[in-house]
Amino acid sequence: MKKLIAVALIAVSMISIASNAYALVSVRGYTRSNGTYVRPHIRTNPDGYTWNNFSY
């Protein structure tokens, strides 16, 4: 029983780590139409929820 619980905890933690890895998106630097350069940055994956964004 202890082995089953340990395996379940390891599986849950691995799934949690993997899902967090895909929550961030790298944005390349670009130049806007008015000539302003936007530096490369990282943002959250757009998903429609406001509570899980950096700006919340």
Image (spheres, helix red, strand yellow):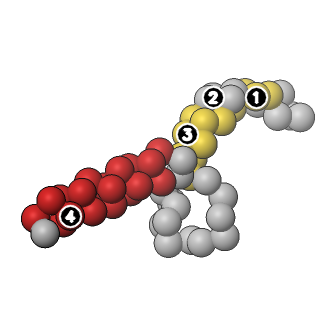
Task: Name the residue type under label 1.
Answer: Tyr
Q: State the image coordinates of residue 30 (x, y, percent, origin top left).
A: 76, 28
Question: Disc 4 to disc 3, how far (Cα)?
Answer: 38 Å
Q: Which residue is mark 1?
A: 30
Q: State the image coordinates of residue 10 (x, y, percent, origin top left).
A: 26, 54
Mark 4 and mark 3 residues within 8 Å of each other at the beta carbon: no
Please tell me whether mark 1 sits on a helix, a strand or a loop: strand
Please tell me whether mark 2 sits on a helix, a strand or a loop: loop
Please tell me whether mark 4 sits on a helix, a strand or a loop: helix
Question: Disc 3 to disc 2, how far (Cα)?
Answer: 10 Å
- In the foreground, 15 or 23: 15
Q: Earlier in the sequence, mark 4 or mark 2?
A: 4
Task: Name the residue type under label 3.
Answer: Ile
Residue 54, compared with residue 25, is above or below; it is below
The answer to whether residue 9 is visible is: no
Q: Is residue 56 left or right of residue 33?
A: left
* Label 2 Cα neighbours within 10 Å, binned few <14 / some 14-19 / many ≥20: few
Q: Which residue is mark 3?
A: 42
Task: Name the residue type under label 4.
Answer: Leu
The answer to whether residue 35 is visible is: yes
Nearer to us of marks 3 and 2 is 3
Q: Earlier in the sequence, mark 1 or mark 2?
A: 1
Q: Which dot marks residue 39?
A: 2
Q: Residue at x 66, y 58 (%)?
A: 46
Question: Disc 4 to disc 2, how far (Cα)?
Answer: 48 Å
Q: Earlier in the sequence, mark 1 or mark 3?
A: 1
- In the foreground, 26 or 56: 26
